[in-house]
Image: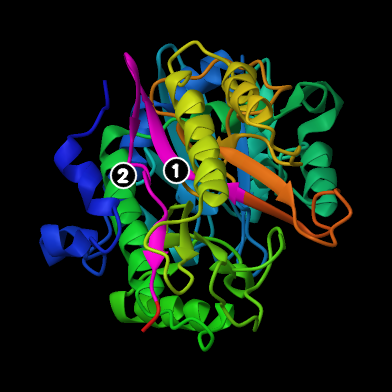
Amino acid sequence: MHPFPLRLAALLLVGAPLAAQAPAARHDFTGPSPWPAIRQERIRTLLPAAMAGANVDAWVVLVRENNNDPLALHVGGENAGAPSGILFLREGDRVRSVMLSGFGEAIALRELGVHDSVVVYDVESGGLLGGIAARVAHAERIAINSGNLAIADGLTHTQRTALERALGPDLSARLVSSTDLVSRWLAIKLPAEVEIMRRAAELTAQLEHEAYATVIPGTTRDSDLAVFLKGRMRALGVTDGWSPAQNPSVNSGPDRGHSHASDRVIQHGDVIQIDFGIKVHGVWVTDIQRFAYVLRPGEDIPPPDVQRKWLAAREGGAAAFRQLRPGATGGEVDSAQRVVMEAAGSATVPWSTGHPVGYWAHDVGPGLSRRNRRPLEVGNVFAFDGFFAWTLPGGSGRWGDGSKTISVEEMAVITADGAEYLVPPQQELILIRSR
């Protein structure tokens, strides 16, 4: 059974922009950000379980201006001026947070109320690092942001050396990477966050449809669609879901991977890919692809070979979706998609079937890849594809050298009994006619 009404599915068929069916307010992200309240809820409800699951008693995050920790926004240290420290101390089934700050930030931090207590450090009391050492003295395992996960690797060599000097050899021996803790914590999104991402995903898909409606075969360039989408983003007050230079990626020709849109002129018979994501409230991002076919003169539908490839890719994505459920592994989801892809005669692709998405386009958490055996959990959000790849005339047969790929990328959230699409999946190629 589809997790969305068939009435909504029809909205993403050819020429049916979602905006016509939804009030403008639903896709307005210019008002006050809900992030402060959601961050508090995440710390209160999700962090204790993440620390327990990672077997961590204390977590130390050092923040400062001009070269801040990647997780500063998530722990309430985004406005740091003087070097400061945020401690999360696990106490039974709850977490107590303490921020050690310079005197210049303490008043504002107390008013914001992110942390249970804000303490102004000074030289006489041992300074910042001495204050941290005193407060973690009884912790058996102390997490720090140093490891092989980029966003949990914010501690510099200089900071770590100074911290270990303040802790001394015994406490320094208890330091562990926060990688597991951070991955467990950030991989789960609260229902309020999923709803925000759902609204943002609706807007993302709508804008891609709007862009395709501007195409004039033989005149419009891939880069023109990118410029159009940039303009719509500015008008709506949303920002890029990933590197601005490569968002959106628009491609009507051979595969280009993660790339800027070229000046290639769109022609009759082209299959066009738009890979696009937006960031809303400065926090949450989307990652959705939509595909179109440019009808040749005299065509009313795509030719059978193009339609066959499209349907194979679509079915691969649907097979992956059917495997999305609590307790399943990323490897099981990836395998389900690849079985369909290989049976349809697709060439291989270098990508995994999907990845977490939320605070970053490539977020943390279990990936949908062959090697991933981590169980999926309620609240995990994914962007995932169904693939069909083939070699264009003159290509070598290797991906990226004259290859072409349809990659039907959708977004879904893991629920208690399976998964839900954030927006209805694309069911048919968007058809572009001559003008």
Q: Residue furthest right?
A: 396
Give the side of residue 291 with respect to residue 420, left or right. Answer: right
Sequence-wise first label, 2 or 1: 1
Magenta span has 282? no
At a point 33% along the width and 74% down the height, the residue shown is: 237
Q: Position of residue 41 (x, y in %)?
A: 31, 35
- Determine whether the residue tagged by mark 1 lies in a helix, strand or loop: strand
Task: Tally the marks.
Answer: 2
Q: Position of residue 329 (x, y in %)?
A: 58, 16
Magenta span has 421? yes
**Disc 1 target residue:** 410
The numbered mark at residue 423 is 2
Q: Position of residue 418 (x, y in %)?
A: 36, 18
Residue 141 versus residue 408: which sits nearer the camera? 408
- Determine whether the residue tagged by mark 2 lies in a helix, strand or loop: loop
Residue 412 versus residue 291: which sits nearer the camera? 291
Specify start and end residues of the magenta stretch as a single range: 406-433
Q: Real-space Cα distance between discs 2 and 1? A: 8 Å
Q: Position of residue 241 (x, y in %)?
A: 50, 61
Q: Quadrant of residue 367?
A: top right
Decide: few, some or many residues near mark 1? Use Cα within 10 Å; few <14, some 14-19, many ≥20: many
Give the side of residue 268 with respect to residue 155, left or right. Answer: left
At a point 89% along the width and 54% down the height, the residue shown is: 396
Decide: few, some or many residues near mark 2? Use Cα within 10 Å; few <14, some 14-19, many ≥20: many
Under mark 2, the amino acid is Val
Residue 75 versus residue 90: which sits nearer the camera? 75
> Is label 2 in contact with label 1 (beta carbons under 8 Å)?
yes
Q: Residue furthest bottom?
A: 219
The numbered mark at residue 17 is none
Residue 113, visible in the rendered structure: no
Query: Which image quarter holds the N terminus?
Result: top left
Give the side of residue 220 with respect to residue 261, left or right. Answer: left
